[in-house]
Amino acid sequence: MYIDKNCSCGEPETVEHYLLHCSNYEEARERMRTSIYFITGNIHMDLDTLLGIDEEEINRDNRNEILCHLENYLTESVSCVGWTTPEELYSGADDHLVLKWNLSNNETNTLVKLPDDVFPTDMHWFPKSAAGGGKKTGSDLFVLTSTDGKIHLISKTGRVEKSIEAHKGAVLAGRWSYDGSALVTAGEDGQVKIWSRSGMLRSTLTQNSSSVYGIAWGPDSDQVLFTNGRQLVIKSLQPNAKPTMWKAHDGVILNVDWNPVNNLILSGGEDCRYKVWDTYGRVMYNSSAHDYPITSVAWTPDGELFAVGSFNTLRICDQAGWSYSLEKPNTGSLFKLAWSGDGTQVAGACGNGQVLIGHLIERRLEWKNYEATVVSSKQVDVRNVVNDVKDKLDFRDRIIKLSFAFSHLIVATSSQCYIFNVRNFNTPMIFDLKEGNVTLILQAEKHFVLVDTAGVYVYSYDGRMVSSPRYAGMRADVLNYQTVALSNDTIAIRDKTDEKVVYVFDAQTGKNLGDGKPITHKLEVMEIALDQCGPATERRLAIVDKNRDLYVTSVRVFGGERKTHKLGNMIQSLAWNDSANMLAAFADSKFTVWYYPNVTFITSMLTMCVCAEKCICEFGKNPQILQFTGNHVVIRRAEGSIVSTVTSPYPSILHNYVQSSRFADAVRLCRFVKDDILWACLAAMSAYAKDLNTAEVSYAAILEAEKVQFIVNIKDIPVKEARNAEMALLCGSPQDAEAILLTAGLTFRAIMLNIQLYNWDRALELAVKHKTHVDTVLGYRQRYLERFSKKENIKRYQQYKDGIEIDWEKIESKIEYEYQKERERPTPSSQPASTGSTGSSVSRTGGPRPRVTAQT
C-alpha cells in the first residue's frame, strides 16, 4: 500500500488501482511511484513502550508483544525480504538493489545490483533443511521474481546463476517447496507454474482469468495453494486430481500462507480482513474489518503465531486467530513479512522505503506460584507470587523457546540450553545445543524433550542427554505439542508421512517399545497425549482422530493384541493431570473430566459413571485447555483471555490411596464424601487391582447387583489362578483370563470359558489340542443349536459330530471330576485373594461347586 499525495484523506492505493488505467504491471508501478508521497528521515520506536493494543487485546497478562525498529533505506519502496539465518536478512526494492543486513554488527552491504528494467516483487531462499545447512550457515541460493516476467536464481555471493522467462507480465510470487525439489511461481497472467530445482519448466499447474497474487506449498510439497480473485484454490500436483476451491473474501485476496506444522491456511485481502482456514475450506477465524486492506500475512515456522501487515499496521496473532498485540509503525504498507528460522524475529518490507525488524517479547509462562516473563530478547524475569521474590535471568544469546513445568524452567537460546530449578535460580545447568533452532520443549517429571530441525532429544534435568528416538522418514521440523507426547518412561510421536501411525519409544533407551511395531489407528491422528503417573506397564495414550473422537490405548504390548477403547467424541482440547491419571477435555460442547479413564479397559458400563461434566457456556466458543495441575484447570477462551476452573480434590486423593494399596482408607474416603462418581472410580480401581472385598463394597454402593453377585461367586472358587482369571473376565479381558488358566494348567476352565463366551471355534480347538472334553464341547454346542433351532454350519463341528457320541451322564461325571480335582489341588492358602479389610459383610471360603460365568 502507498499514500497518494493527491488524496486528502491519506487513503492508500493498491497497484490494482493503477492497473485499471494502465496496460501492464510495469507501467502501473511506474505511474504509482510518481504519485507517491514518501516519508523520509530516521524513525525510532521506544523499545520499552508498546505503541498500542486494540479493543481485542483483553488478555494483556499473557500476550506476545513485539519490539520494532526501522532500518533506513533509500527513497524507493521495499518489495520483499528474506532470512538466511536469524542474524542475516536480505531485502529487495525498487531501486534495483538487493541488500544484505547483518544484525549482529549492524552492517548493510549491497549483494547485487539488478538491471534498470528489473523491479523485484518477491524473494524466497532455498530451504535450509533441503540444503543440509547447519546451525551457523543458511541457504546458498534464492529465487527473485520481478516485474519483467522473469525469475532469477541468485547465489549468496550475489551472482545471478540463471534468469528465466517465466510469465507474461509480472511474476508476483515464487516459493521453493519444503523438500527443495521444486519451485512454484504465480504471475500477472493468471498462470501457476512448477519448475525444477535447476529452473526447468515442469508443468503449468493452472490457468486463471485473474492475476494470482499469493501462493504457498502444502506441508508434503504435493499440493499448491493459490489465490484466484476472491477465491482460494488448493491444487494437487497430480494431473487428474480435483482442486479444492472456495470463496474466502469479499475482495481480492492479496496474500496467503500455509503452515506445515499446524496445517492451517492464512489469508488476507482487500476486504480488510484476515482469516484462518483448515484444508477443507472451513473458516477457523474471521477477523473484524481493519481500516486498510491486508497486504501481507506470514506464519511463524512452528505455527504457534502469525503476523499480519497492513498500512502502518503490524499485528501478532495466536494460531487460533485472536490478536496478541498491535503495532502502528510509520511504515506505509507492509508488502511482505518474513519470520526468522527460530520464530523470534519478523521482518517487513515497507512501502516508505524502510525495512522493519521486530523482536518478540513479553512471552509469559506460569507454573503453580511462579511466573516467568521474557522482558527482552536476552532476559527473563521470574516472580514468586506468594512472597513476591523476583529473579532476573540474563543470557548471552537470543532466547528462542522456554518451558515451565515440574519445578523446572527450561530456556533454549540460539546456542545453549539452561535448566533452572525453582529452589535456586542462581546456578542453572547449561549445555550446548547441536542445532540453534529449538522448535519444541516438552517436560515430564524426570526429564524433558528438545525438538529441533535435526531430531528429537531426551535430556535429564542435570543436562545429560538420555536418548534420541528416531524412525525411518521422521520429519522433526513439523513436530509440535499435538504430535509429540512425553511421560517419565515413554515418548510418542505421530508420523507425518502416514498420520494414522504413532511411534512409541522407551524414553531411557530411545528404542521402540514392545514388539517394535507402531500404533496404527483406523483414521488420521490429530492429537496425542500420554498419562503422567503409574507404572510403565500401565501407560495409556490418548488419541484424538480426524473425526475428533477420543480413544485410549495401551502403550506397552507384548505379543497380544493392542487394546483401544473409545472414551468420547467431538473433542476440542484435552490434557492429562500432572499428579494423577485423570483426563480433562472439552467434549461435545461440555467440559468433561474422566477421573479414571482406565475404566474403559475394565468395563465400559462405568465409563459415564466416572466422569464429571460442566456446561461449556462459561468458557465461550472453542476454548483450549492449557494446564491441568492438581484440581485446577487453566483454560484459554477463544478471544485469548485466560480463565480457570476447579475439579473435585477427592479423586486425586483416591488415586494416591489405591496406588499405595491403602484400600481401607479409600473406602473410608468414599463413605465420607458420599459421591457415586468416587464409588464408581473405586469399584473400577479395585477390580483392576483384584481386591475382591473392596470391589464388592464399591459395586454395592453404586447398586451394581450383578457385579456383586459375580464377585461373590469368584470368592467361592478355591483355586487362586481361577479367581484371577475370573477377575480378568470381570475387567473385560477374556484373552487374559484364558492365558491365566492355560498357564496354570486349568485347561477345562479355559474350555468352559470359551463356551460361556460362545467362542465355539476356540473351545473346540483347545479340546482337540489337549485331547480332553471334546464331547463336552460338542454337547454344549448341540444344546445351543437346539435352543435356537439352528443347523450346524461350522465344518469342524460337522467333522467331529459323527465320530463322537454325546452322553450327558459321562459329560456331567467328567465335569464333576474336574471340579473335585480343583478342590483337592494344593494351594498356598485357602483364603481368596484380598488386600486389606474394607468392612465387607461377605467373606466366604470353600462354598458350593464353582461356576464358570462370563459377561457377554
Image (cartoon, rainbow, N blue to C red):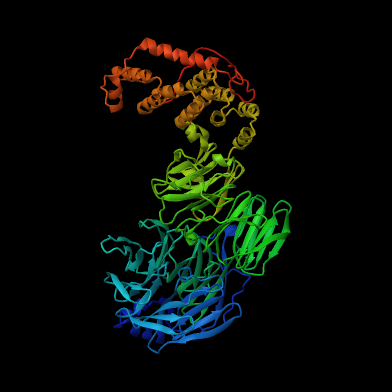
Q: Is residue 448 above or below residue 766?
A: below
Image mark count:
0
Residue at 41% across, 62% down: 219
Q: 612 above or below 179?
A: above
385 or 37: nearer the eye?
A: 385
Pinpoint residue 330: horizontal percent, then vertical percent.
52, 76
x, y percentage for residue 213?
Answer: 36, 72
Q: Dividing the image into 4 quarters, which one contains the N terminus?
A: bottom left
Q: Residue furthest bottom?
A: 116
Q: Is residue 382 left or right of residue 639?
A: right
Residue 271 visible to the viewer: no
Provide residue 163's location: percent of width, then percent of height.
Answer: 37, 83
Compared with 403, 110 (above or below) is below
Residue 783, above or below 520: above
Which part of the image, by quadrant, shows the C terminus? Answer: top left
x then y, percent, for residue 546: 40, 49
Q: Is residue 825 visible?
A: yes
Horizontal side, residue 411 vs residue 603: left or right = right
For residue 287, side relative to residue 61 (left or right): left
Find residue 435 and report its image quarter. Answer: bottom right
Q: Quadrant of residue 400?
A: bottom right
Quadrant of residue 678 within the rendered picture? top right
